[in-house]
Amino acid sequence: MIFFEVFMWFLYFETAKVCNKPTILNKIPSSELVLNPDGSIYHLKLKPDEIADTILLVGDQGRVETISSKFDTIEVKRHNREFVTHTGTYRGKRLTALSTGIGTDNLDIVMNELDALVNINLDERIILEKKKSLRLVRIGTSGTIQADIPVDSVVVSSHGLGFDGLMHFYGYKESSGEAGLLKQINEKLRLPDNINRPYLTSADEALLNLLSKDYYTGITATASGFYAPQGRELRLKPAVHDLNERMMAFSAGGHRITNFEMETSALFGLSAMLGHQACTACAIIANRARLEYSKDYKPVIENLIISVLDRLSSND
């Protein structure tokens, strides 16, 4: 009887190989790949055919409509929790605009679920052999720590300096170039041991070259919060009271830390590990060195959106 069962299992696996079909052992459990009753991915509430290969990511839900108002056509509108998605065409190119909410924890959800939509067969719950690479561009707002970068300008991120700790859970390993640069940053910052160990991730080189023309570029620090993690003090004092000053002073090999926000390090790191292309372009709405804040940054965002749309649509 035992011999018969072993033989049947052997026959099952061999047949699966010949037919190029997955076995039950390949399937991702429902507790790990969570789907809605209609078959859509859990948080984004999207199906594979509802997203484009080029996706614009924004933190603010309202900014999705700002982007899609420039589209020639809109075929999909979806809203679940803080995740709003519009898919349509701009100058003949199919694009998706999607809101992530604030923080690398949300980026963790968005990136894994977008990847699942294109690289996992949701019906069979198996990873596809042929992988698809998405182009992901974050359009956001940010505060600069450098006095020479004016309010209402734009910074395109060459790197994400992560203070959030997310990528450590994925065992992210810096490239030799990233590791060397991070070593120099750590030597300058001299952070206390009880602060998250920073990590460094990089933008996709092709997207960086495409989007950075006429804009500032630099290392973007991704914070785990808005107040103390970015050196702000209201009623609670930051543990590192001169964090911004330490970052302002860093310069090595033409690199400097230019601005603070809360998503880029995770976007770059997860994209690299999953085989996607990513870049970030942020409107500078505050200058922390000069203690200045934009009087009206909406025109800057509008112009940045149009610039990114034009560059992406003319690049294929």
Image: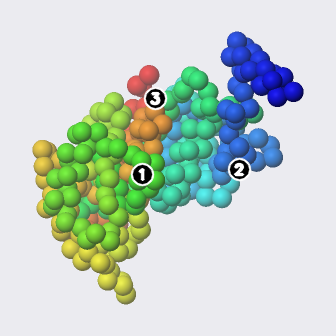
Q: Where residue 273 sits: x, y (%)?
A: 44, 38
Write the residue at 32% across / 69% down. 195
Q: Is residue 145 above or below residue 98?
A: below
Write the residue at 52% across / 51% down. 108
Give the crowd class for mark 2: few <14, some 14-19, many >=20 residues within 10 Å: few
Tag 1 residue: 167
Quadrant location, the C terminus: top left
Sequence-wise, the earlier of marks 3 and 2 is 2
* Residue situated in front as seen by the camera: 254 or 139: 254
State how far apart marks 1 and 2 are (Cα). 22 Å
Write the residue at 35% across / 75% down. 228
- Seen as rendered, the residue at the extreme right is 1
Tag 3 residue: 313
Q: Is residue 231 above or below residue 234?
A: above
Quarter where residue 287 is shown: bottom left
- Seen as rendered, the residue at the extreme top is 18
Amino acid on which the number 1 mark rests in the picture: Met
The local secondary structure at tag 2 comes to loop
State how far apart marks 3 and 1 are (Cα). 31 Å
Quadrant location, the N terminus: top right
The local secondary structure at tag 3 comes to helix
Give the crowd class for mark 3: few <14, some 14-19, many >=20 residues within 10 Å: some
Q: Is residue 302 above or below residue 247?
A: above
Tag 2 residue: 31
Q: Where residue 127 sits: x, y (%)?
A: 62, 31
| Tag 1 near tag 2, CB within 8 Å | no
Sequence-wise, the earlier of marks 3 and 1 is 1
Amino acid on which the number 3 mark rests in the picture: Ser
